[in-house]
Image (cartoon, grey):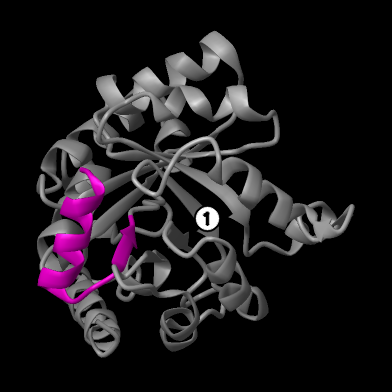
Amino acid sequence: MNRTQLVNAIREKKSVLCVGLDTDTTKIPKHLFAEEDPVFAFNKAIIDATKDYTVAYKINTAFYEAQGIKGWISLGKTLDYIPKDIFTIADAKRGDIGNTAEQYALTFFNTYPFDSVTVAPYMGSDSVKPFLQFEGNWAIVLGLTSNAGSADFQLQQCGDELLYEKVLKTVAGWGNPGNLMFVIGATRMEQLKHIRTILPDHFFLVPGVGAQGGDVDTVCQNAMNKDGGILINVSRGVIYVSEGQDFAERAGEAAKAYQQQMAAYL
């Protein structure tokens, strides 16, 4: 999905919601274990209930890789089931160099045809640029994350600026706002507005809303641009609202509530 298609989807749905399919087999409703593929059965029901309110789905590959071959099968079936007009993210956080990075790009753009994949930039340009060679696909590069440990490196002084600022400015020069996004945590409220001044046109994938303490209003007020410019990821706050038979219905209600809150800014 290219930038124009993503922006159009945001305008049509009046939403910047990204639903995280971080499907944990210890948290899905117990009745689903009667299904042949409980993970896919859960994801399918969540997608059916939320697809009218979301413009993106983020699949955290760790929850699938941990299940071995059957997890990869569930991942593939889930990806195939997501409507083609909804942006897809492989949250894989790959970050190797050279031929290895090229193979990771082929994995998540060809073998599993995601629109985008999250990438760690620590090893430099040759760990990111292979992901930028695919027309219509995106690299979503870790910028300023929401975890407590991000202060260990990202918020350290690096010359006249903080390390995360240097990363954002440097990586932005490797691609363009049509193939590069950045992960910016919602809990970094004090930096959101500043980062938007550094990168006025790029999209931000914003985790941390809901269970981690970030809120939609703060993110929208400080990080939106004329095209929307953000994808606010919510995982637990949508997919695990209920553990009962009504889990999908309740997820749909949660997604709709987030969408309505976002619509006020679009």
Q: Which residues are magenta?
A: 1-20
Disc 1, SS: strand
**Residue 124 image-quadrant placement:** top right
Which residue is labeled 1 in the image? Answer: 183
Nearest the viewer among 44 and 27 is: 44
Quadrant in the picture for the N terminus: top left
Quadrant in the picture for the C terminus: bottom left
Nearest the viewer among 73 and 138 is: 138
In this view, 172 is above or below 7? above
Give the x, y percent position of residue 135: 27, 29
User: Would residue 33 appear left or right of 233 to someone viewing this image?
Assistant: left
Task: Name the amino acid, label 1.
Answer: Val
- Check if residue 91 falls in the magenta segment: no
**Residue 173 image-quadrant placement:** top right
In this view, 102 is above or below 233? above
User: Would residue 3 appear left or right of 171 to someone viewing this image?
Assistant: left
- Check if residue 5 falls in the magenta segment: yes
Give the x, y percent position of residue 122: 70, 35
In this view, 121 is above or below 156? above
**Residue 65 image-quadrant placement:** top left
Q: Residue at x 18, y 68 (%)?
A: 248
